[in-house]
């Protein structure tokens, strides 16, 4: 069985997270838009923080195809869904990730449907039956994960600021990274 997620190690990761946070503050409208998903200009990000691209090489040599910031306001819990792409991607901690959990679920017989809005497309779960938690990860380090497994974010209840992560997709998804 392939893994649902796997940690990977990046040198000076906390320093890198700090640089990304400053970049988001100074060069994007993440903090005014407060959208749960916001695509960012990966070329510009890499120009400012070349070591971010370097860090992704731990996972794959495939070029980055997109990067998005996931913004979860304090108190956010759940929002279980499946990503439309169902791709294997990177999730990189930026801020307030300690004590917050990304949880993964078994559909438990629920059916799913595609949802499209102006800002995003995702797969919604009908929730006729309770979802069954099958894994939970505190994002203390970056992970590679399977966005085709139902998942949701449960923020740290003690945290006053938004939980920020960057998710990164690749031209060729690094699915084999999750081989056990
Ligand atoms: Fe997702």
Image (cartoon, rainbow, N blue to C red):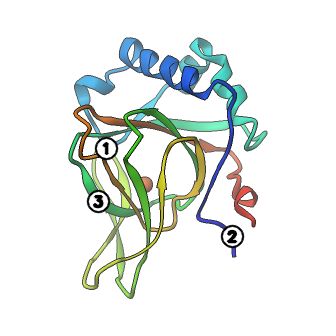
Q: Which residue is mark 3?
A: 78
User: Where's the N terminus, which quadrant?
Assistant: bottom right
The CA distance from mark 2 to mark 1 is 31 Å
Q: Is residue 5 left or right of residue 58?
A: left
Q: Residue at x 41, y 41 (%)?
A: 98
Q: For residue 54, which numbered disc appears in the image?
A: none
Q: Which comes sooner in the sequence, label 3 or label 2?
A: 2
Q: Which comes sooner in the sequence, label 3 or label 1?
A: 3
The spot of residue 170 in percent (x, y) is 65, 44
Task: Look at the numbered disc 1 and give the secondary structure of its residue.
Answer: loop
Q: Which comes sooner in the sequence, label 2 or label 1?
A: 2
Counting the numbered discs, the total is 3
Q: Which residue is mark 2?
A: 2
Camera-side mark, 2 or 1: 2
The CA distance from mark 3 to mark 1 is 19 Å
Residue 128 or 131: which is nearer the viewer? 131
User: Mark 2 Cα within 10 Å, few/some/many (few <14, many 20+)?
Assistant: few
Q: Residue at x 23, y 23 (%)?
A: 32
Q: Which residue is mark 1?
A: 119
Is the residue 46 above or below the residue 57 in the image?
A: above
> Assess mark 2: CB under 8 A from ligand 1?
no
The CA distance from mark 3 to mark 2 is 24 Å
- Tell me whether the residue at label 3 lies in contact with that at label 1, contact meaning CB atoms closer than 8 angstroms: no
């Amino acid at each position: 069985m392939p893994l649902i997620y796997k940690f990977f190690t990046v040198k000076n990761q906390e320093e890198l997270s700090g640089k990304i946070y400053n970049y988001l503050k100074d060069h994007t409208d993440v903090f005014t838009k407060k959208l749960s998903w916001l695509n960012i200009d990966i070329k510009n990000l890499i120009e400012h923080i070349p070591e971010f691209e370097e860090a992704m090489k731990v996972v794959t040599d495939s070029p980055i195809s997109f990067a998005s910031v996931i913004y979860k306001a304090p108190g956010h819990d759940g929002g279980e869904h499946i990503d439309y792409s169902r791709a294997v991607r990177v999730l990189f901690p930026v801020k307030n990730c300690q004590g917050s959990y990304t949880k993964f679920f078994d559909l438990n017989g629920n059916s799913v449907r595609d949802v499209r809005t102006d800002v995003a497309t995702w797969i919604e779960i009908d929730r006729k039956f309770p979802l069954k938690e099958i894994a939970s990860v505190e994002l203390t380090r970056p992970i590679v994960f399977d966005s085709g497994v139902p998942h949701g974010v449960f923020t740290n209840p003690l945290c006053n600021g938004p939980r920020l992560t960057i998710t990164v997709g690749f031209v060729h998804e690094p699915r084999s990274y999750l081989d056990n």
